[in-house]
Image: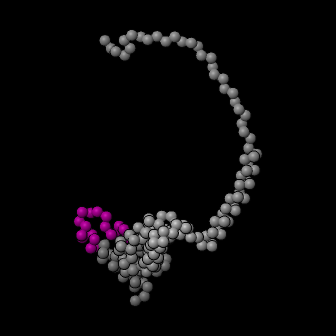
Amino acid sequence: MGVAGTNEKTIDSIAGRVEDARTANSAGSVCAEQIVSTKANLHQIWRETMNKLSSFSHRVSENRDVMAASEFARWVSFSGLIPFFKQNPQPEPFKVDGSILEWTVDHLIERCNDRFRTNNSDPKLSVDEFESLHDKVDKLASNLDTVAGYLARMSVAPAVKVESLPREEVELTVISGGLDKP
């Protein structure tokens, strides 16, 4: 069976699960058809999960959000997404690969566990990331001269003296009864 057969099998498998969910869901709440209706939706769920794992991986390298990364990776591991994506692989352009997801999750959990086990709070930046940060700082420093030049040319408006208007003394009287109505 080629790639096309795999996709047809995937769609048939999802359609069968949707039909099962529809019959089990007589109350009319959200069913699987609304969540996974096309190959593109399945790819989007996989891609966004991978993007979140990648983001957490970078943050763990910087020793930020290690607990949140660990919790998310463990949730993905136990949620059933990995077996679902392994059962429903798709090629490009709507790639879905459960094995890559599983490896990414396991790798992130391992990195989080290493941080917890060693109590290591030092950020780990690769040479490329460090050089990129260095370049950005250099660009900011060179732009500061330009900004300082613009600020030096700006003139400050002269101070304006505001005089208060003379007030006339008004005698106030209290009216007895006020708001009371007879």
Residue found 69% across the figure and 30% down from its top: 160
How far from the left and from the top, in percent, is residue 126? Answer: 60, 73
Residue found 30% across the figure and 77% down from its top: 16
How far from the left and from the top, in percent, is residue 14? Answer: 34, 76
Evaluate whether residue 98 shows in this view.
yes
Quadrant where the image shows the N terminus: bottom left
How far from the left and from the top, in percent, is residue 71? Answer: 41, 67
State which quadrant residue 69 falls in. bottom left
Does residue 140 sit above or below 88 in this rendering?
above
Is residue 35 within the magenta segment? yes
Is residue 61 within the magenta segment? no
How far from the left and from the top, in percent, is residue 74? Answer: 39, 71
Foreground of the two, 31 or 50: 50
Residue that sits furthest to the bottom in the current view? 1
Residue found 42% across the figure and 71% down from its top: 73
Q: Which residues are magenta?
A: 19-38
Quadrant where the image shows the C terminus: top left
Residue found 63% across the figure and 22% down from its top: 164
Decide if residue 14 is on the left or right side of residue 2.
left
Decide if residue 27 is on the left or right side of residue 108.
left
